[in-house]
Image (cartoon, rainbow, N blue to C red):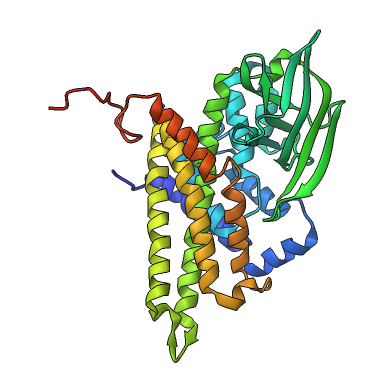
Amino acid sequence: MDFSLSDDQRAIAEMADSVFRDYCTDERMREFDLDEQPFMLPLWQTCIDTGLHALAIPEAFGGSGMGITDLYCVLRAQGAGLGQVPLWQHQLAAACLVEYAADSQRELIEQAAAGEALLSLSLQGLAASRGVKLQLLEQGGLLLQGQASAVDIAAQADRLLLVADSADGPCLVLLDPRSEGVELLPGITNHGLAVADVRCANVLLDAAQVLPAAAVRWLEQRAIAAVAAVQLGVSEEQLRRTVEYVNQREQFGRAIGTFQAVQMSMADCHIAIEGLRTSLYQLCYRLDAGLPSDSEAFATRYLGTEAAHLIGHKTQHVHGGIGVDLTYPIHRFLYWSRHLSLVLGGSAATLERLGDWLANNDKLGWKYDLDENKNLC
């Protein structure tokens, strides 16, 4: 496999690194913890000014028309900086509308590409044990009722792309959170982003607000790649900071990084990162190439949730008592890892879905597109 980036992708990565590194200092992160902003509004404006908010939106609608691999370069930098902005939610929602509702939603998509409208999405019902709690009913019209829980920046967004259960199975609906019959219950996630429960009581929709069933799988696979890219950035920086710490922290007259147990813990973290990176690269490649990516997405999701838990806790553990001091920055990486590991379903739920896929597809594992009984000689 060739893991190298193109010149354009390297330029995007460097610009994103600069944006998030310059803004997301530890001092500014402490300020964000205390000022009760829904997300980092000045950083979001910088993303709009630099075009990072619209990389995945096609050029015909005012975006940059780039692929998932290009978006990965930005999201990895966002994760490393813990930049609290809705980058992947905004542009993947817009890109999904381009793919499945371009004719009816052109104005909204163009506003999103220009930074004039803010979009968000939630797919959590697909992996929730209680199932999808939003219901799309046909009762003299299309009515939406039920609840979507902890939707990112729901109170700040102009439109929300949510999963609803219908007579034909799960589908995506485009909802104005200020519509009649919508109630928002605001809250905040453990890593600091504003969310809200979206409660719907017979909200009237028109047909243009309901996307085809195929949009669910299209969006979920790209959301998995996006969340995994953010997690990769979080974990890489978390491990880098921890290695720096254990090489400086001394106990019994020597750096604790020389202790075998600490070295083995850090090696486990490095292996988990490389496993996630490899799977994520393949998923991004296949999505950009238009290849089927069901099993690749589930495998990447599983590796991402496992890496988030393992790296988050091992790096926190070797920091000892200083790791529980909220004036020290390492706890934020643990909070982000815990949040990201559950955004689209935990490891057990994801592994079950991967197992179901493997049980119903006669392929040689998730890595190949060959029938098991094909003669390879």
Across and down, in percent, residue 187 comes to 78, 48
Residue nearest the viewer, comparing 98 with 116: 98
- Counting labels gives 0
> Which quadrant is home to the N terminus?
top left
Above/below status of 94 relative to 195: above
Across and down, in percent, residue 203 comes to 82, 22
Residue 293 in sight here: no
Of all residues shown, which one is farthest toward the bottom? 253
Of all residues shown, which one is farthest toward the right? 180
Of all residues shown, which one is farthest toward the top? 140
Above/below status of 87 relative to 232: above
| Left or right: 180 in relation to 91 | right
Of all residues shown, which one is farthest toward the left? 377
Across and down, in percent, residue 9 comes to 43, 45
Across and down, in percent, residue 211 comes to 63, 19
Above/below status of 85 relative to 173: below
Q: What residue appears at the point 65 percent right and 31 percent down from the top-left corner?
A: 131
Q: What residue appears at the point 39 percent right and 79 percent down from the top-left corner?
A: 259
> Which quadrant is home to the C terminus?
top left
Residue nearest the viewer, comparing 9 with 290: 290
Name the quadrant containing residue 223. Answer: top right
| Left or right: 72 in relation to 117 | left
Residue nearest the viewer, comparing 180 with 29: 180
| Left or right: 77 in relation to 288 | right
Residue 160 in sight here: yes
